[in-house]
Image (tube, rainbow, N blue to C red):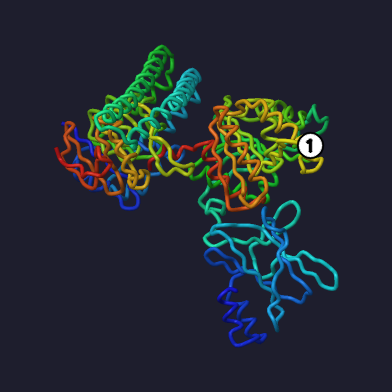
Amino acid sequence: MNLQIDNLFRDGAPTAVKIAEFIQNNRFPMVEPGHVTFIFQGKADEVNLRRWISGLSTAQSMLALEGTDLWALRMELPDKSRFEYKFETIRGGQRDLVLDKLNKVVAHDPFGANSVCQGYGYTRPFWTLHDEESRKGTLTGFQMHSTVFESRRDIQVYLPARFRRSRSYPLLVVHDGPDYLQYADFKTVLDNLIHRLEIPPMIVAMTQSPDRLVEYTGDRRHARFIGEELLQEMNSKFPLVDSNSGRGLMGASLGGVATLHTARHYPNRFGQLLLQSGSFAFSDLGQHQKGPIFDPVVKFVNEYRKNPFALAEKIYMSCGIYESLIYENRSLVPLLQAQGMQVRFEEARDAHNWENWRDRLRPGLSWLFPGPLWMVYE
Amino acid sequence: MVMQILLGPQNPVPNLRQAIEAINADGPIVVITAGWRDSEGEIDEMREIAGRPLEDLKLYQRAEEVFAHEPALRELQRERQDKLTALQRLYRIRLAPTLTAARKLMRTRAEPELLRLEQRAAISQLRALDTHHLRRIRSIHQNFNRRRAGLDIPRALVQRDEVHRLVENAGLVLIAGGHVAVLLNRIRLFGLDQLLAQKPVIAWSAGAMAMTDRIVLFHHSAPQGKRDAELLDAGLGIVHRRVLLPHASTRLDWSNRRRMALFSRRFSPAQCCTLDNGSMIQLDAEQVTDVSDSYIVARTGRKKPLTKT
């Protein structure tokens, strides 16, 4: 077990006062090089650590520390890793998933919140944090009618600080943009990277699908909406750079699939693609095991693997090594590179979550859209 | 003879005042801060450091005003910038594999005589590519100048004349750093190339780069990863046969000797001179008459102190 816990139990079961001191004097989970120890305090028949790491079982039993209401689990964890978790308590046959009360670091996503385990050496990138000195862009928005979907769509738009109509700006279209804003601090990241000259001032159009399980899984209507309707609308409303290399498209998870699918139907219309943990399910032989939602994804990815061609100038891909999609993402990289595109692939010691995607925004965006830092010598 | 002093970044410890004292020029001092773009003209701190009255030429703001009233010039300017951007992209397509080949040859093992000739050939190809690129850039500028001469742009001429008058009356011109392409563009737009060659000038960082005949962009630890050094443009051509490297201690990977050696040989016979905070190179008729804290990148990839000539 962990050294601090060994010390706590050195003279037998600790008193309530000693436990309180132990809780007060430590940060949880307790990280050390190569390992992490989780502590749960409370009454239960059984406690499990539930974490979303591919390759490991979803639930791992925690050990009841005799004579106390503490439960502990020490596990191996490579340095600089990050993953999200909850505790599962079982009492009187009732199962509950709860946050780690001893850990203040919490990540949010559209399904709620999770506790975050930050392994030894992980620090949140400084450029994801609010910087007083960074000039702030503005968020605006509009509604547009989509002919292909026969419905109205809300588009949120980020305009960089000191936006001027007399200038032309690159355009980045973001699938699940409002989620990126809410869960990945996207506006702060854009403000900071633009202020630090790492990316140019750009206009960002953020879309949100009302039915992403259909529209993002290889739906030609969606490709047309992004590749034609939205682009026309953005061009009519904002001063945009009129070149493929000045246009980017991005998304995470199924948003990555929607990005690649749109690029396949409109090759090179977006010169820059950013794909984060794309759910690029495919099958080499027989039926895939991902469930019916993935049928159109598998069909599209299989077709593209059979007849690949260049989709963009540059593609930045990232994926966490603790997510099962690492296999699909790794497999796709050489295929994309072989089409003559510049492809950069980054693996992170992280899983399928918004903070992983947040932490990869700087290398991705600054590679796809290099900012004037290159030209600035103060 | 006209003296120029080239300095490194003025943060955290400025050496501008020492340079002004060394140049000991009579008459008003004018400043070019167009590289600061929207922050142009915010020179209170500089005034304090200089300990002398300074007047900013406001080239960036004047250019904005000119573009707003001279649409033909604005269009011509935009066309030139688009062409330069497109050309730079094409140059990079050729540069990447040429540099990769040269790097591979620099680290490969083979019979020495055989290898040396191949390495030389690879470096010659790099130089030829840079030379070709520079020629293409110059032709775009010449085309712009030719077409601009045919435009009726009274507003631009008024501004140009006013800037020329201020520079002619000045005893010293300071050129601050910032965005090197913007800075160079604005200096050219107002036709200051010839005039600056006849004036004592103190220039730092991007300002110093603009004074040379070749502007090389570099950053070995950019946020998106290592990036190949590339030729941006011909500079004003006042300082010859020197490639100036502001922030060299942080922007260059000195631990990679092969990379640095290739850098040096690629731009040879020009001397690659570092300009960090505290650096100073004093030039008089092309000769280095005084120097402090500046180094050249030697053929071995190591730093070698720059010395007086």
Q: Position of residue A113 (x, y in %)?
A: 72, 58
- Pick whichever, A361 or A261, lies toward us: A261
Location of residue A138 by image quarter: top right
Q: Position of residue B172 (x, y in %)?
A: 25, 36
Q: Position of residue B95 (x, y in %)?
A: 41, 28
Question: Which quarter shows the C terminus of chain B?
Answer: top left
In the picture shown, does residue A347 fall above or below B213? below
**Badge 1 sits on which subunit?**
A
- Which residue shows up at 24% across the image and 35% down it? B271
Residue farthest toward the right in the current orientation of the protein: A93
Res. B305 visible in picture? yes
In the picture shown, does residue A94 fall above or below A144? below
Q: Position of B308 compared to B150: left or right?
A: left
Badge count = 1
Q: Secondary structure at mark 1?
A: helix
Res. B59 visible in picture? no
Q: Position of A48 compared to B182: left or right?
A: right
In the picture shown, does residue A36 fall above or below B290? below
Task: Give the residue number, with chain letter if any, for mark 1.
Answer: A295
- Pick whichever, B116 or B78, lies toward us: B116
Q: Amino acid at mark 1?
A: Asp
- Pick whichever, A236 or B233, lies toward us: B233
Location of residue A10 by image quarter: bottom right
Residue farthest toward the top in the current orientation of the protein: B150
Q: Position of residue B107 (x, y in %)?
A: 34, 37
Mark 1: few/some/many CA within 10 Å (<14, 14-19, 20+): some
- Pick whichever, A245 or A280, lies toward us: A280
Question: Which quarter shows the N terminus of chain B?
Answer: top left
Q: Position of A282 compared to B150: left or right?
A: right
